[in-house]
Amino acid sequence: MEHYLDNAATTRPSGGVISVIRQVLEEDWGNPSSLHRKGQEAEKYLRRSRRQIASVLLTGEESVFFTSCATESTNTCLKGAVYKQRHVGKHILTTRGEHAATYEVLKVLANEGFEIQEIDNDETGRILLQDLEAKLRPDTALVTAIHVNNETGVIQPVKEMGKLIKDKAPKALFHVDATQSFAKYALFPDKWGIDMISASAHKINGPKGVGLLYLRRGLQIPALLAGGGQENRFRSGTENVPFIAGFGQAAEEMWKDHEAITAGMQEIKLHLVHRLLTELEGVTVNGPSPEDGAAHIVNVRIDRVRSEVLLHALEDDGVYVSSGSACSSNKPMEKSRPLAALGLSAEQIDNSLRISFGRFSDMTDADACVDSILKNVPVLRMHRRR
């Protein structure tokens, strides 16, 4: 029996999502740009999904654009924002634990002469609002932050950040990477002073290959793709109608029951962590406490066991989790920026495991994971390289 606990990487599509994708592929497969009935039927799915996603964000449908993934959305936002903001300045603020989709773009911008400055965080990885306030400047063009960290589950105070940015640096644009939070947690950009959002369908039981880009109404940034003028002339190319339809369905399903779903994931997470901390020595939770972090992510460090080795031992028992690093470098920042931001050494990062829950997780999965860890860790510790 399989016990899938790597939901921060991707999630299993729901039955409703699979059904609507099949319907579009088999019956309503027209090009939404076509004027005939077949095209109009396809266009209805685009409008429906835009409406479904807009309702989650409490925004207008004109602010919702579809892309191929959250990485494309993030690239579009960051590169478009700095071009639009070139008259404001070249100062960019970000957090220390960003996903590569953000961090790699910022590296490119740094090489082009932009000043990238990181906001200090506490021992859990949560940013210090007073440091953000101190570092905001008249020439701050952009602030970008991940809402829920994909490795540690720390939740950044984006609502408070938005207000602070608009008060202290009103010309700055604020981008939020909501890949791990969209439809799981409240995120209301029009009310919170957020200008741009990126997210992805496959984190909420939708399909891979479709992403979300939110732009505040009236905000215009350069498009990355030119061509036929789809997505209100912002992203050219024939839309991926089946997967966009699946995205809208996934968003509606998740948001409708998000409180119950997150409460269930939180209960499973607390159970798993309690068992690990009480039944195995040398276990530490990285980042926020299990009570304070995102319900679906926990990062644990198991002393004297490399997570990459433990991951495969767990896989042999049908348990799927994620390693905290690629174990290919002795530099903490190259292994895991979120864990390095907590002050962890390269060895500690090598011993860290991410366990992440989803809508279909249950206590059986948690217990199977803990039981496998309890079985394998003593053996791995005994045979570890010294």
Image (cartoon, helix red, strand yellow):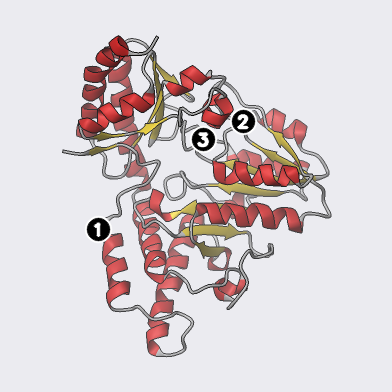
Question: CA–CA distance between discs 2 and 1?
Answer: 38 Å
Q: Relative to 80, is 303 above or below?
A: above
Quadrant into which the N terminus falls:
top left
Three-letter amino acid code of the residue under disc 2:
Ile
Quadrant in which residue 31 is drawn: bottom left
Crowd tier of the residue under label 2, counting other residues whose Cα lies within 10 Å: few below 14, some 14–19, many 20 or above: many
Q: Relative to 199, is 297 above or below?
A: above
Name the side, left or right, on which 319 lies relative to 59: left
- In the picture, the disc for residue 155 is 3
Q: Which residue is drawn at 28% across and 55% down?
A: 14
Circle nearer the N terminus (3, 1):
1
* Local SS, label 3: loop
Crowd tier of the residue under label 1, counting other residues whose Cα lies within 10 Å: few below 14, some 14–19, many 20 or above: few
3 and 1 marks in contact (CB < 8 Å):
no
Three-letter amino acid code of the residue under disc 1:
Gly
Question: CA–CA distance between discs 3 and 1?
Answer: 29 Å
Circle nearer the N terminus (2, 1):
1
Q: Where is residue 87 in the image (x, y as percent from the top left)?
A: 84, 55
Q: Relative to 125, is 35 above or below?
A: below
Q: Is residue 166 visible?
A: no
Q: Is residue 182 visible?
A: yes
Return the residue at label 2.
127
Q: Where is residue 157 in the image (x, y as percent from the top left)?
A: 58, 36
* Local SS, label 1: helix
Q: Which residue is drawn at 22% across and 31% down?
A: 316
Q: Position of residue 55 (x, y in %)?
A: 47, 60
* Mark whose residue sits in front, 3 or 1: 1
Three-letter amino acid code of the residue under disc 3:
Ile
Return the residue at label 1.
15
